[in-house]
Amino acid sequence: MADRGFEYQGVNHVALVCKDMKKTVDFYTQVLEMKLVKTLDLPNGSGQHFFFDAGNGATIAFFWFPDAPQAAPGIASQNSAPGTSIATAHGSMNHLAVSIPLEKFDEYKQRLEEKGIQVRVINHADTPEGYTKGVTDKTWIRSMYFRDPDNIALELAAYTRAFDDRDIQHEPATEADSPRYLAQRAS
């Protein structure tokens, strides 16, 4: 029997959390000269998710959550309890995504499940709901999420198409857009 080892293709993206998406966009595009390749407004006003080209198909992604906790060293991972928010503190790492071949996505999911790993699959699309159950012409990435033994959120991901002009459609949020920030200014 042939080796059935996973075929990794490098880091897909690292997802961090920022306090001010506008400042983050300015820094990564102007200072580091990375191209902004994808912008998303999350469903129900729950935040934003922007991606910067890090070369060779890899991206650095940032979430902005309007009610994110302030930066707090040691509080830097997602809450894994069912029904809780995926928001993490400013400056934290939200999850680590590794690229896999699109054509092997379903095989890898099955293999992880055979190893006893609980996997959650999302096919991302730009719909008001945020996701679709199947790949459509709007689906830009297939993702499977699971956790390591230390409860670190991991993702195996495969882009379904190249990024293009339709992927940049949202204005970046600022720190001033956070309700917590506005409440602090009022007091």
Image (cartoon, rainbow, N blue to C red):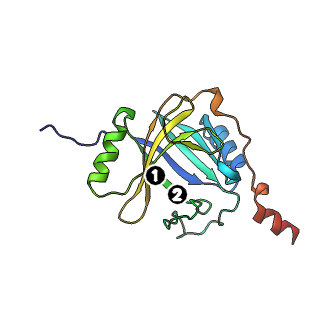
In the rendered view, tell whether residue 21 sits above or below residue 162.
Answer: below
Query: Is mark 1 in CB contact (under 8 Å) with mark 2?
Result: yes
Q: Which residue is mark 1?
A: 96
Camera-side residue of 130 and 8: 130
Identify the residue shown where x is 64% and y is 27%.
Answer: 165
Residue 33 visible, this orientation = no
Q: Nearer the viewer, residue 93 or 114?
A: 114
Q: Amino acid at mark 2?
A: Met
Q: Position of residue 49 (x, y in %)?
A: 62, 46
What is the crowding at mark 2: few (fewer than 14 residues within 10 Å), some, or many (at least 20)? many
Residue 93's tag is 2
Please state which amino acid type lies under the numbered disc 1. Leu
Q: Residue 82 vs residue 70: left or right? A: left
* Outermost residue toward the bottom in this view: 187
Residue pushed farthest front? 133
Among the 4 quarters of the image, the one containing residue 92: bottom right
Q: Secondary structure at mark 1?
A: strand
| Farthest left residue in view | 1
Residue at the spot 50% in from the left edge and 42% down from the top edge: 133
What quarter of the picture does the N terminus occupy? top left
Q: Quadrant of the C terminus?
A: bottom right
Which residue is more in the foreground, 10 or 64?
A: 64
Q: Is residue 45 above or below residue 139?
A: below
Secondary element type, mark 2: strand
Q: CA distance from mark 1 to mark 2?
A: 8 Å
Q: How many marks?
A: 2
Q: Residue at x 31, y 40 (%)?
A: 107
Residue 119 percent coordinates (x, y): 39, 53
Judge left or right: residue 71 versus residue 122. Answer: right
Q: Is residue 53 shown left or right of residue 47?
A: left
Q: Look at the image and tell me whether residue 172 can be seen.
A: yes
In x, y percent, where is residue 80?
A: 48, 65
